[in-house]
Every structure is written in structure tokens, then in C-alpha cells.
Amino acid sequence: MSVYGAYHRDARNRATHFVGVPIIIFAPQVAFGWMRLSIAGVTLSGAMLFVIIVHAYYFRLDIALATAMTVFSLVLLYFSEQVAQLEFVQSFAIFLFLFIGGWILQLLGHYFEGRKPALVDNFFQIFVAPLFLMAEVFFALGWRPTLRATVEHLVELQMQTRGNQPMNDGQATT
């Protein structure tokens, strides 16, 4: 989370991410929802399987954040499943609008930040983003102060390592 945090210091960037990240989570869940598999009378979608896999990773990292993230994700999953079941043309139009719109918000935030997105250097950061934002909610509520202090300390180390320079200047990052 500290690597992700180092790419997201600007308040405007964080604000765009609080809207854009859920949209970017939702849109692919719609697409994954088009893929359905029935096993012993139970129908599972690709979105359901994806959420299960990602949340297994989240629970490995932090039970409290993962639990809160699961509640949020189940709401998104419910609505994405509804959209996935619409007529395909309508479902695809919603997917496309949200997917493009979500990324526009993300890029706008990084324009404000003056730094490239974290996933440019490490695609896995795309899976960290939702959990990081949930941690930000916890921190804003005064929950998990030790985790907050640890993340902020590690972010500062990340920033010092890079000389607090914009990360879109072509330098290698880890």
C-alpha cells in the first residue's frame, strides 16, 4: 500500500480515485458477469469467481479491511450482475461508458498529481487500489491508527527514495 500511496498524494487525485476506482471495479464485473457456469444447479458468473479470488488475497493481507471491502464489493457485484443480465447491447454500452469514464477520472487525477499511475510500473497495483481506498476510509474514521502510521512512514520512505520527484519523468521505480 505504501507504493500505491506514494503515487497518490494530491487530494484531487484521491478524490477522483474514490469515484473512478469503484467504477473501474464495476465495469469489468459486468463483463465477467457475461460468462456464466452452472454447476449442480448453481450458476456462477466470472464476476463472482473474480471477486472470490481477489478477496482471498485481501483477507490474506488484512482481515478488517478485507471484511469491509467484501461488504462494498458484494453491493457492486449485485448491481454488476443485474447489468450483465440486460440485453447484451445495453449491457455492453453501460460497460463501455463506465470503463472509459472511470479511466478518464483516473487519468485526470494523475494529471493533477503530476505522476503516472502506479499500475504503469506494477500492474498488480490495480488490485491494491480498492483496498488502499478502504484503508483511507478507515484512517479518516480514526480506525487502525497503527496501520496508518506504518503506511504513512513507508510512503515517506518511498518519496525520499524518489527524491519526491514526479514519477512520470521516465525514472525506474519499484
Image: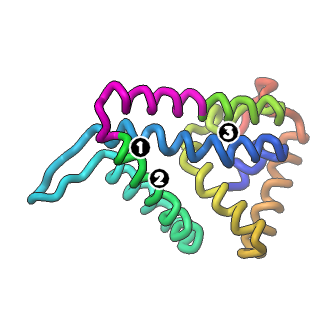
Q: Earlier in the sequence, mark 2 or mark 1?
A: 1
Name the residue beneath numbered marker 3.
118
Give the x, y percent position of residue 67: 51, 70
Relative to 159, 123 lies left or right: left
Name the residue beneath numbered marker 1.
29
**Above/below status of 167 relative to 140:** above
Observer-side mark, 2 or 3, equals 2
Dot 1 crowding, Cα within 10 Å, few <14, some 14–19, many 20+:
many
Q: Amino acid at mark 3?
A: Ala
Q: Is residue 99 magenta?
A: yes
Q: Are marks 2 and 1 in contact (CB under 8 Å)?
A: yes
Give the x, y percent position of residue 25: 51, 44
In whole angstroms, how far apart are the C-alphas of marks 2 and 3?
Answer: 24 Å
Q: Secondary structure at mark 1?
A: helix
Q: Are marks 2 and 3 in contact (CB under 8 Å)?
A: no
- Residue drawn at x 54%, y 48% is 127
Relative to 100, 140 lies left or right: right
Which SS does the magenta portion mostly show?
helix
- Residue drawn at x 72%, y 60% is 136
Relative to 17, 36 lies left or right: left
Dot 3 crowding, Cα within 10 Å, few <14, some 14–19, many 20+:
many
Q: Which residues are magenta?
A: 84-101
- Residue drawn at x 75%, y 35% is 109
Disc number at residue 76? 2
- Residue drawn at x 18%, y 47% is 37
In whole angstroms, how far apart are the C-alphas of marks 2 and 1?
Answer: 8 Å
In whole angstroms, how far apart are the C-alphas of marks 1 and 3?
Answer: 22 Å
Tell me the quadrant of the picture where the C terminus can be found: top right
Relative to 114, 60 lies left or right: left
